[in-house]
Image (cartoon, rainbow, N blue to C red):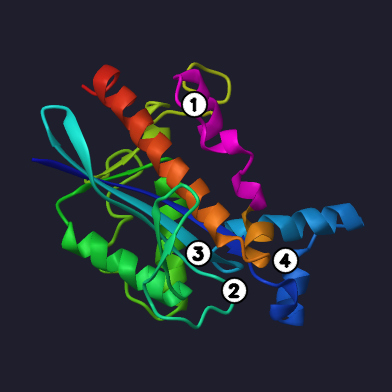
Amino acid sequence: MERYIVFDIETASMDFDSFSESQQEYLVRGAVTDEEIEQKKFMLGLYPFTAQVVCIGLQLMEGVNGEYEIKNEAAFSTLPDYDGEEGAELTLPSGKQCLLYTERGLLEAFWKIVTKYSGATLISFNGRSFDVPFLMLRSALLKIRPSRNLMNGTKWNYPGHTDLIDELSFYNPSPYSASKRFNFDFYTRAFGITSPKSEGVDGSMVSELYNKGEIATISDYCLRDINATWELFLVWQKYLKF
């Protein structure tokens, strides 16, 4: 029995005023114009010390001989200042399931699943460079010890995790060669897969949507991400895995 966990995260920047004066100076250092300062602030959503995890999309797949089925699929999400029941259920506009947590709660839930299905292969797109280090560092900042070191291995060999951005650039990316890395939207469209951005939402909008409390929109977008990641994995597995 093959088992896979497809995952993706969405992040939102923290309020700039929540940082100390010295931190604020550091974060915008080198920016001169108002436009440059705003661009620096916009980029804060990419870093675990200046942003938080607001959604984790998870899809558990099982199968034999290339025939797979979804065993479970859900978004673990949070809202600004959420103080409700941990794991409260929310049905998304897509009809899929969202479970509401504090950020601490959704991280703890993620590590429990990773432990429960320790034999499953993780599937991601750019997970080794973004999602995994973000999850591990946010956990540490909230005094949560990750149940597994998901950054084990080396840049070229890490067991138990298929990061498709590495596979599709053959672990040898170059901006001027056939192994150039493209973004996820480009890869999906190139392989005839429906892009998660096709409904008008992309990662650059998450912070704004989060601050408006539109967690259902974020969650559905995140789940579209993992659905497309799985489809891209199947293409790679069929034609490029040796």
Q: Amino acid at mark 1?
A: Tyr
Check contact, mark 4 vs mark 1: CB within 8 A: no
Find out whether the residues at labels 2 and 3 contact each other: C-beta distance under 8 Å. Answer: no
Say which label, 2 or 3, has the lower sequence index.
3
User: x%, y% of residue 64?
Assistant: 10, 33
Q: Quadrant of the C terminus?
A: top left
Reading the image, the residue beneath label 1 is 187
Residue 66 rendering spot, x and y as whole percentages: 16, 27
In the image, 138: left or right of 17? left
Q: Residue flagged by tag 3: what amino acid is it?
A: Val
Picture coordinates of residue 199, whole percent (x, y): 59, 37
Q: Which image quadrant: the N terminus?
A: top left
Q: Earlier in the sequence, mark 2 or mark 4?
A: 4
Which residue does the numbered mark 2 point to in the structure image? 80
Relative side of 182 to 66, left or right: right
Find out whether the residues at labels 3 and 1 contact each other: C-beta distance under 8 Å: no
Closest to the camera, between mark 2 and mark 1, is: 2
Q: Is residue 2 left or right of residue 232?
A: left
Element on which disc 2 rests: loop
Q: Amino acid at mark 2?
A: Pro
| Badge 3 or badge 1: first in the primary sequence | 3
Residue identifier under label 4: 27
Dot 3 corresponds to which residue? 53
How far apart are labels 3 and 1 at the CA level? 25 Å
Depth check, front residue: 63 or 160:
63
Point out the stretch of residues depicted in magenta. Answer: 183-205
